[in-house]
Image: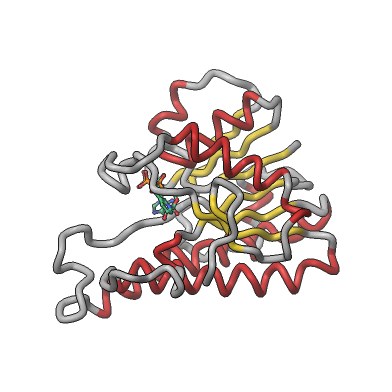
């Protein structure tokens, strides 16, 4: 199975890399700035690719970067939270620049990646998994704030749903995931669960993607997230 993962050098992305390599898959592990933890893996089936998802790539990129003709699973994992201090995403102080920056990475980024790799995913009648967050759920928002991250992840749920509807006739499954609150750099390692638990759950959901409606928003424990 050919698997592509963005933001794969650390955190959940690296957890996905370890999981799918252990399953015997060929893994194209994309990183923004540096390969970091990927450098500690010695496996012929690991293919590191430098890819900042803010960049609009030329049509030749997928071939030049060495992506396979058929992609069975594409995981749009790369993401940023934006400012983590209290005022950085508060109503009175969040800036247009912050809103646009987080939107560019967390919502437009996955869209760019899918547009770039779509013929390869379609050829394999593959699966696309987009990592959103419960923070992007309107139904789950009882605490307000976090304007940039909530808005970008909510928008990704919508984009992911449209992808699911558009690609279903092509035999491509699209699912939106919530990883849980996970101990990574994004949460300053303050989450409730570890990367292995989150990735173990999400990969099970991905394997069972046919059991869910196209574009369903599903947490790592298999529960539907209301949005
Ligand atoms: N951890 C949680 O509790 C939690 C909860 C809900 C949703 N999520 C979502 O799960 C995903 C992974 O989160 P995480 O906790 O593993 O975060 P993380 O530890 O902060 O890792 C984020 C990854 O995304 C990459 N990235 C950031 N901007 C990028 C860009 N422009 N292009 C390509 N890659 C980029 C980072 O690369 P660099 O190392 O180069 O910065 C890093 O590899 C994110 O989409 C996040 O929003 C996480």
| Quadrant assignment, res 223 | bottom right
- The image position of residue 104, as x and y in percent, is 42, 69
Q: Nearer the viewer, residue 211 or 162?
A: 211
Q: Is residue 152 left or right of residue 203?
A: left
Q: Nearer the viewer, residue 34 or 121?
A: 121
- The image position of residue 146, as x and y in percent, is 28, 68
Residue at 45% in and 59% down:
133
| Quadrant assignment, res 150 | bottom left
Q: Nearer the viewer, residue 62 or 77?
A: 77
Q: Is residue 202 above or below residue 20?
A: below
Q: Is residue 143 above or below residue 67?
A: below
Q: Nearer the viewer, residue 43 or 127?
A: 127
Q: Is residue 80 left or right of residue 113?
A: left
Q: Is residue 184 left or right of residue 110?
A: left
**Image quadrant in which the N terminus is located:** top right
Question: Total of numbered circles in the picture?
Answer: 0
- The image position of residue 41, as x and y in percent, is 50, 21
- The image position of residue 109, as x and y in percent, is 50, 63
Residue at 65% in and 41% down:
204
Residue at 45% in and 49% down:
180
Q: Is residue 82 above or below residue 144?
A: above
| Quadrant assignment, res 130 | bottom right
Residue at 55% in and 39% down:
29
- Of all residues, the one furthest to the top in this rendering is 42
Figure coloring? secondary structure
């Amino acid at each position: 199975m050919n698997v592509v993962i963005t933001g794969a050098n650390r955190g959940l992305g690296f957890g996905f890399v370890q999981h799918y390599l252990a399953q015997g898959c060929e893994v194209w592990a994309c990183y923004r700035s540096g390969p970091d933890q990927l450098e500690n893996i010695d496996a012929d089936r690991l293919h590191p690719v430098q890819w900042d998802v803010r960049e609009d790539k030329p049509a030749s990129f997928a071939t030049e970067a060495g992506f396979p003709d058929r992609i069975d699973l594409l995981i749009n994992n790369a993401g940023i939270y934006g400012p983590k201090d209290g005022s950085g995403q508060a109503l009175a102080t969040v800036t247009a620049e912050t809103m646009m920056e987080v939107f560019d990475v967390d919502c437009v980024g996955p869209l760019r990646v899918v547009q770039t790799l779509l013929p390869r995913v379609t050829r394999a009648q593959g699966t696309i998994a987009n990592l959103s967050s419960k923070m992007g759920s309107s139904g789950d928002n009882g605490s307000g704030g976090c304007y940039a991250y909530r808005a970008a992840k909510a928008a990704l749920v919508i984009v992911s749903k449209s992808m699911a509807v558009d690609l279903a006739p092509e035999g491509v499954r699209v699912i939106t995931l919530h990883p849980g609150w996970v101990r990574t750099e994004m949460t300053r390692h303050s989450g409730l669960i570890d990367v292995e638990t989150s990735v173990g759950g999400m990969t099970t959901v991905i394997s069972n993607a046919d059991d869910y409606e196209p574009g369903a928003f599903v947490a790592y424990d298999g529960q539907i997230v209301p949005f």
